[in-house]
Image: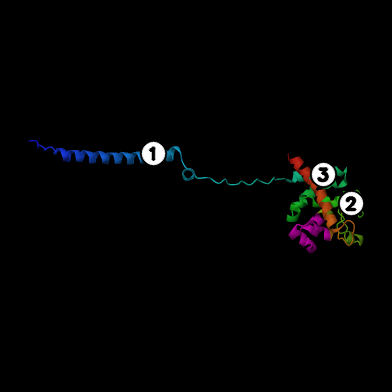
Amino acid sequence: MARIISPLPEPERDSFISTARNAGSGFTSLIRNVASSIFDAIAKPSGDFRQASLPISTPIPTSTPATQYNLDNYTQAITEGYKHWGDLPAARFAQIFAQEAQKYPVLKKYPFLLPAIALLETSGGKNVTYPKNILNWGIRPQAKGLFSPQSEEEVIQKAASGIGQRFSYYENFRKSGNLTELANVYAPIADNPESGGEIYANRLKEVMDIFEQALKKNKR
């Protein structure tokens, strides 16, 4: 048999209804406030919100690979570079100039050093003072009969190994890569007051730049 619940007296009933309504109104207001906050965060995110939600990625720099040149590139650059000064005998030895430069670190750094020396010393082989010696390499011993090269190739090989490895007085140049250090030995200012030392180094740089331009042009 169902239990009959007696109705509340009118004053207590009115008080209960009022309390329930107030509680419902507060709960509804709370729900609305929470919903509004969520909507604002999504629809109108603040800077902090965007930063937290979308982390900034830092670009990783990529290195540009250095241009790679082969023996043929260097040989052609020497041949073409010499044409800047006309038809020079030294151009015939472009390949061995290029080959020898690849054997020694300091000559790898300056692959056109020996061709440039040939230009400054003997006008690229046009004005040779000592037989076969287009670089004027070891001319003092040669003048005394202590050095008798059998070919231009031999002179180029001996100059490359002497500068690049054998002779201690080029050690400062090998360590520093400073062309003035080379010039102070190859063309000392005391023996060449108007063209030696730093002047010689600067002229070498100017000549090597011509070969460098030919190298880059041929690589395009």
Is 148 or 91 nearer to us in this picture? 91
The x, y position of residue 71, in whole percent, is 74, 46
Residue to which mark 1 is pinned: 36
**Circle nearer the N terminus (1, 3):** 1
Rendered view: 122 above or below 217: below
Q: Amino acid at mark 2?
A: Thr
Q: CA distance from mark 1 to mark 3?
A: 77 Å
Q: Describe the element under mark 2 as helix, strand or loop.
A: helix
- In this rendering, would 215 be left or right of 90? left
Report whether residue 154 is seen: no
Height in image: 150 above or below 48?
below
Tell me which corner region of the image, top left, top right, bottom left or bottom right, holds residue 78: top right
Whether the residues at callouts 2 and 1 have beta carbons within 8 Å, the answer is: no
Q: Nearer the viewer, residue 6 or 110?
A: 6
Q: Marks 3 and 1: in contact by CB < 8 Å?
A: no
Quadrant where the N terminus is found in the figure: top left
Q: Quadrant of residue 138?
A: bottom right
Q: Please tell me which of labels 2 and 1 falls first in the chain.
A: 1
Q: Nearer the viewer, residue 38 or 128?
A: 38
Q: Is residue 15 left or right of residue 197?
A: left
Amino acid type indicated by mark 3: Gly
* Residue of label 3: 81
The secondary structure type at the circle numbered 3 is helix
Which range of residues does the magenta coloring cover? 157-184
Q: Which residue is mark 2?
A: 122
